[in-house]
Amino acid sequence: MTSKIHILPEILTNKIAAGEVIQRPASVVKELMENAIDAGADKIEVTIEQGGRTLIQVTDNGQGMNGDELKLAFRRHATSKIAKVDDLFKIATLGFRGEALASIASVAMVEAISKSADGDDTEAFVLKYDAGRETTFEPSAWPVGTQITIKNLFFNVPARLKFLKGKRTELNHILDIFKPLALSHPDLQFKLTSDQKVLLDCKPGDPGQRIVQIFGREYEKKIVSVENTRGQVKITGYIGNLDLVRVARGEQYLFVNGRPVTDRLLNNAVYGAYRSLIQRGEFPFFVLMVDLPPAEVDVNVHPTKSEVKFKDEWRVYHILKETVETGLRETMKMVPGLHDRPRAQSFFSRPEPAPFSPDQTPRGEYAGPNPNPDPNQFNLYGGGEPGTGPTRFPERSAEDSELLRKAREFSQVLQRNPEPVARGPERTAGGFIWQVHNKYILSQINSGIAIIDQHVAHERILFEEAMHQLDTRSGHSQTLLFPQTVEFPPDDYNTLLDILPDLNKLGFQVREFGPRTLLIEAVPVDMRGGAEGDVLREIVDYYRSNREFDYSPGKRLSASYACKAAVKAGDPLTEEEMRTLVDRLFATEHPFYCPHGRPIIIQLTIDELDKRFERH
């Protein structure tokens, strides 16, 4: 009688393991980079094509392998990193299970070439696999180190292949692997090339320099070093000031003994330290290293080793929170953005400020509101009310400030503005209209009163206008006097390249200008200048986090632009602005709900008011 239970063949078990370990190209990059780091390499190069679909190649100058070791490395559960059960409880390497190479070889075409650093063996060997079957093993010429090339990932597993996303999406997943490993090993050199374009080239340096290499020069003055030691637990790293707070996750990095991890409790420790400084739905920037004895942490609790367990997790939690709180407290008064966080401002153009006088208004400050605003244009930038003092803007470079000073002095010669005049509420034929707490618009209607949320009202207006502009390519632009070059982190840059054609339909004029850099030549007519990079970053954040709203990229982009460009809660409006906003709202197709379904208008009838006041 034939048994119903049997041992699976090795090629099938490898494919099953590949389903757990190798989920997408980024999984391959992770395993190969970790192997290179564990091999003692100080130079690691990653090359990919088509988001890793057609080619993944990782080259290192580590200690390498001889011929026997190279063949053995592609056997399941073959590893040099642990030897006995006790080793599982004091793991000091990134990898240890010995499953990755066998799993990768079962679902791709693989070529591995390596030469050992041992003096006894000076010959290199090349080993080739095709869908789990060895096809070539022979001597070759190669310097000390290892190069592993993966071609046509999942070519023999069509069901897995069809679930891969577009090349830029897969590239972003690879960046999500590459960046943490580069951040946690600043003493090593890392290079990432995609489709023959160098995305990241990180030279050895200190942790702060590595952050700048990956995220851009603007981070250099916005990060704060922290360090704290309690017993055997040591916390080091950097936290960002409030200029680096974003509305989407992605720039929060935690490492335990050099291993990138995801830990909700430790993340909450950091968020708890920032709680009084950020709003709900905002996420600070941090790169934090937790070092403790390997025996105090278990890394063998997750298939991808992205989660860990501590013997005393609450102790680590409190030490981490204390470290971040101390860093914030000590820098509150000296780091821009941590002491007085500016009120949210809208991205729309404001009236021309009063003439500049070096003795009267310091650089970087706004002299006051325009006393004669154009009734047909919103003044939605969020300037201070009369008597509230100047509004602080982000600091400009010395060159930009000098150009701005000369431009203001020249305009002062051509035209002089009259003195500001205080304006009180005016009664018109349309009745009173009031702004409540710079957030809601209160107006009389035939049946009672209407309360309008100014932000979502403007968001609905801009959303419908943006959708029309995308359909008709009719977005109007205002050309910048000085085009702006803005450097972005690689993942933001890739997302922007995806939506660039639609951005240009909305009125932006943006084009590629070198690796990770865009040149902004014009912006939509309603958008203020001077913060173009910030606007694009916020649009990217919102675009990424807005997938549940609509899968259509056009709708997501329109919603992202509308939300980030609309007047904000806290922005004061003139009576003319409020009336224009209400008129434009009721000219839309759906004036009662914002693009995400939030109500725009609440109506209170006379009958409801009479009941509240017990009038019978």
Image (spheres, rainbow, N blue to C red):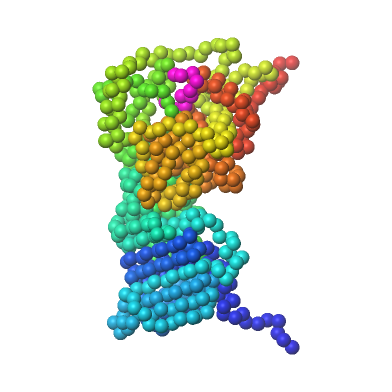
Q: Nearer the viewer, residue 329 or 244?
A: 244
- At x 36% / y 13%, what residue is drawn? 418
Image coordinates of residue 516 in percent, x first then y, are: 39, 50
Q: In the displayed structure, would residue 319 be above or below residue 364?
A: below
Residue 375: within the magenta? yes
Q: In the displayed structure, would residue 483 be above or below residue 149?
A: above
Q: Nearer the viewer, residue 246 or 396?
A: 396
Position of the N terminus, as image quadrant, is: bottom right
- At x 28% / y 27%, what residue is drawn? 405
Total label count?
0
Position of the C terminus, as image quadrant, is: top right
Q: In the displayed structure, would residue 120 be above or below residue 478?
A: below
The extreme bottom residue here reads: 1
On the question of residue 189 being in view, the answer is: yes
Q: Which residues are magenta?
A: 373-383
Q: Decide whether the magenta segment is chiefly helix, strand or loop.
A: loop
- At x 47% / y 69%, what residue is drawn? 150
On the question of residue 260 being in view, the answer is: no
Left or right relative to 560: residue 445: right
Image coordinates of residue 487 in percent, x first then y, are: 37, 46
Residue 476: within the magenta? no
Image coordinates of residue 156 in percent, x first then y, are: 57, 71
- At x 56% / y 60%, what residue is drawn? 164
Image coordinates of residue 368 in percent, x first then y, are: 37, 22
Instruction: Name the quadrant containing residue 394.
Output: top left
